[in-house]
Image (cartoon, grey):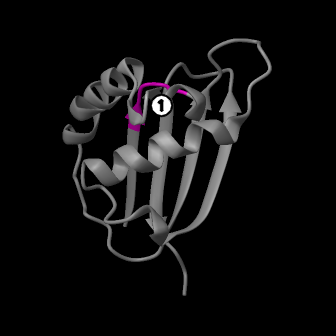
Amino acid sequence: MIYSYNLPVPPSVNALWRISGRRMYRSKKYMEWIAACNEHIYAEDVPGIDYPFNIEIIVGRPSKRRMDIDNRSKAVMDVLQHYGVIADDCLANRITMMWSNDISDCQITIWKAEE
């Protein structure tokens, strides 16, 4: 079975957390993105994948600035786990990521990893 989702462009890992004194908390930008993902995820099946899987993440490039693509994977994997699409991101067998100038969102495809 193959599962596909379109999510808003994820924030960079550098924008996920804030620190105040000894307390670390999710940033406002991250919380808003998680909430925005809710309607996109629940519009599709929520499979609760509890077996090794492969995932392809295609992100619409938000600007021509130099950015690292791998900084976007943490938010995607965490939100998929948060909403129950995947049971645990440690089950990811292969993660493929790329930028695209042809889309403005984040396209995700998940399928069972071959044993």
Q: Where 93 sits versus 35, above or below?
A: below
Would you identify the image quadrant in which residue 37 lies?
top left
Q: Position of residue 85 (x, y in %)?
A: 30, 55
Give the residue at the far front of this rendering: 21
| Observer able to see residue 10 | no
The residue under the point 25% across, 61% down is 47
Majority secondary structure in the magenta region: loop
Where 98 falls versus 53 (above or below)? above
Q: As drawn, is 14 to the left or to the right of 50?
A: right
Percent across and percent down for residue 98 are: 69, 39
| Span colored in magenta | 6-11
Which residue was labeled with disc 1? Answer: 16
> Is 7 included in the stretch rendered in magenta?
yes
Dot 1 lies on which element? loop
Which residue appears at 76% of the width and 12% of the height?
64
Q: Within 10 angstroms of label 1, few (less than 14), some, or many (20 or more) residues?
A: some
Q: Residue at x 65, y 21 (%)?
A: 61
